[in-house]
């Protein structure tokens, strides 16, 4: 079975690098994009199993990317975990209402990141 592919979308290389290393150490294949436009291109090229999405980016921000994905029948079920520094409950509920799988408040630990990734990919413990 091939490794699941995760696309990290964040304009900050200082965030993408440690997230990439954490995920690669767990056997995931990782792709990166620094804005929403790059992310749409990567999604079309590699068909990631999960997107980790920052919201505040130049060019095309995360909300615009999310709206595009959720309006595309072929992409709308792709799991997306929002990475955000915004802790406002109203904003978080807005993202969940837009169809994101989960969210993760910055800054976060590697263990919390991995927990959210596994859950979003359906790799967490089952309730069977």
Image (tube, rainbow, N blue to C red):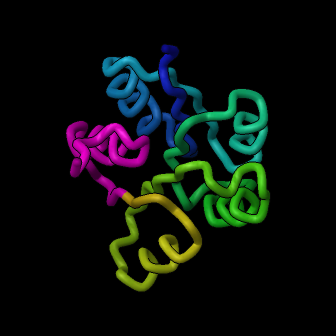
User: In the picture shown, does residue 86 fall above or below 12?
Assistant: below
- Residue at 26%, 49% in the rendered image: 108
User: In the picture shown, does residue 29 fall above or below 82?
Assistant: above
User: In the picture shown, does residue 82 fall above or below 42?
Assistant: below
Q: Nearer the viewer, residue 32 or 29?
A: 29
Give the image quarter of residue 55. bottom right
User: In the picture shown, does residue 24 fall above or below 124?
Assistant: above
In percent of width and height, residue 48 lies at: 61, 34
User: From the viewer's perspective, is 120 left or right of 38?
Assistant: left
User: From the viewer's perspective, is 94 left or right of 103?
Assistant: right
User: From the viewer's perspective, is 45 left or right of 50?
Assistant: right
In percent of width and height, residue 75 lies at: 71, 50
Q: Nearer the viewer, residue 22 or 72?
A: 72
Q: Which residues are magenta?
A: 104-128
- Residue at 37%, 23% in the rendered image: 21
In percent of width and height, residue 71 lies at: 77, 65
Q: Nearer the viewer, residue 87 or 119?
A: 119
Instruction: In the displayed orientation, state which residue is furthest to the front.
Output: 128
Please check the rendered image and state whether residue 108 is part of the magenta-colored stretch, yes or no. yes
- Residue at 56%, 67% in the rendered image: 99
């Amino acid at each position: 079975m091939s490794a699941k592919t995760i696309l990290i979308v964040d304009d900050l290389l200082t965030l993408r690098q440690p997230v990439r290393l954490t995920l690669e150490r767990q056997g995931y294949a990782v792709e990166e994009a620094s804005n929403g436009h790059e992310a749409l291109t990567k999604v079309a090229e590699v068909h990631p199993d999960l997107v980790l999405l920052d919201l505040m980016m130049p060019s095309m921000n995360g909300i615009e990317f999310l709206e595009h994905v959720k309006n595309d029948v072929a992409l709308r079920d792709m799991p997306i975990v929002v990475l955000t520094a915004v802790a406002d409950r109203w904003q978080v509920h807005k993202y969940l209402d837009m169809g994101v799988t989960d969210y993760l408040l910055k800054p976060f630990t590697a263990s919390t990141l991995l927990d959210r990734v596994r859950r979003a990919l359906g790799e967490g413990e089952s309730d069977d």
